[in-house]
Amino acid sequence: MGTPFATRLNHWMQRPRILLHRLLSSAQCVGRPRLRQPLHATGRGEIHFEGRVTIGVYPSPHFHTTLAYLEARNPGAAIHIGDGTVLNNNFCAIAEHTRITLGRRVLVGTGVEIFDSDFHGLRLADRARSDPAWARPVVIEDDVFLGSNVRVLKGVTVGRGSVIANGAVVLSDIPPGVVAGGIPARVLKRLDTP
C-alpha cells in the first residue's frame, strides 16, 4: 500500500482532476460523496447521494487514469446511491429514462457499468431514436458486491447480499443471498447466512 506519505501524495494529485470534473459537471446532485477520484455528473435528471458514499479507491487499478461517470440523462431520470456504498475506479451509471438505485453498503469493483436502457432500438429504423417505453429501472439492493467489470442491464434487480462475479453480464433478476456469474449471469451457489 505504500507509505503514509505516498498515500497522501496520491490523493493530493487527484485534487486538480476532481476540481476540473466538478466544474465540467452539469447534473443536479443532492448530497456530497467523498471523492477520492473525479466524478463527472451530467444530465437533466437528478443524482442523489445518501449519507456517506465513497467514489474512488486507492490503491486500486486505474486510480489516476479514470473517473466515475454518472448520468441522469433526461428529466425524470434519477440515480440514487445509498449510505456506505463504495464505488471503485472507472464506475459508470447511465439512467436514460427511469431510475438506477444502489442500496446501502454496496461494494462496486473497478470498471462496473449499469444502464437502464439500450439507448436506441434494435431494428434498423429505430437505431437513431430512444423510446422511454424501452427503458426499465435497475435496483441493486443493500449489501450487494459487484465484482470488477460487471455489466448490469435494464430491468434488473440484484437481491440483498448477493455477489456478482467479475466480468458477469446481468440480464435478469438475481435473488438475494447468492453468488452469480457468467454471460449471462446465473446463480452459481447460495451464500451461507451470517
Image (cartoon, rainbow, N blue to C red):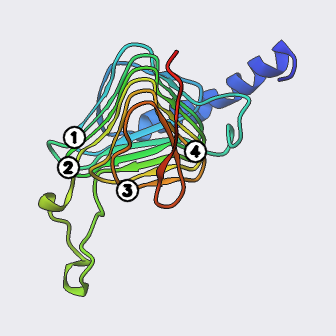
Give the CA distance from mark 2 to mark 3: 23 Å
Q: Which residue is mark 2?
A: 74
* In front of the other: 11 or 109: 109
Labels 1, 4: front one:
4
Give the CA distance from mark 2 to mark 4: 31 Å
Element assignment for label 1:
loop
In primary-sequence order, the first of circles 3 and 1 is 1
Query: How far from the left and from the top, in percent, is residue 131?
Result: 15, 64
Q: Are marks 3 and 4 in contact (CB under 8 Å)?
A: no
Instruction: Give the numbered dot on residue 146.
Output: none
Query: How far from the left and from the top, in percent, is residue 174?
Result: 38, 43
Q: Which residue is mark 4?
A: 165
**Residue type, label 3:** Leu
Q: Is residue 50 above or below residue 23?
A: above
Give the CA distance from mark 3 to mark 4: 14 Å
* In front of the other: 165 or 35: 165
Q: Residue at x 39, y 20 (%)?
A: 104
**Residue type, label 1:** Gly
In primary-sequence order, the first of circles 3 and 4 is 4
**Crowding at mark 4 (Cα within 10 Å: few <14, some 14-19, many 20+):** many
Q: Which residue is mark 3?
A: 171
* In front of the other: 168 or 50: 168
Element assignment for label 3:
loop
**Residue type, label 4:** Ala
**Residue most toward the bottom?**
124
Q: Which residue is mark 1?
A: 45
Labels 2, 4: front one:
4
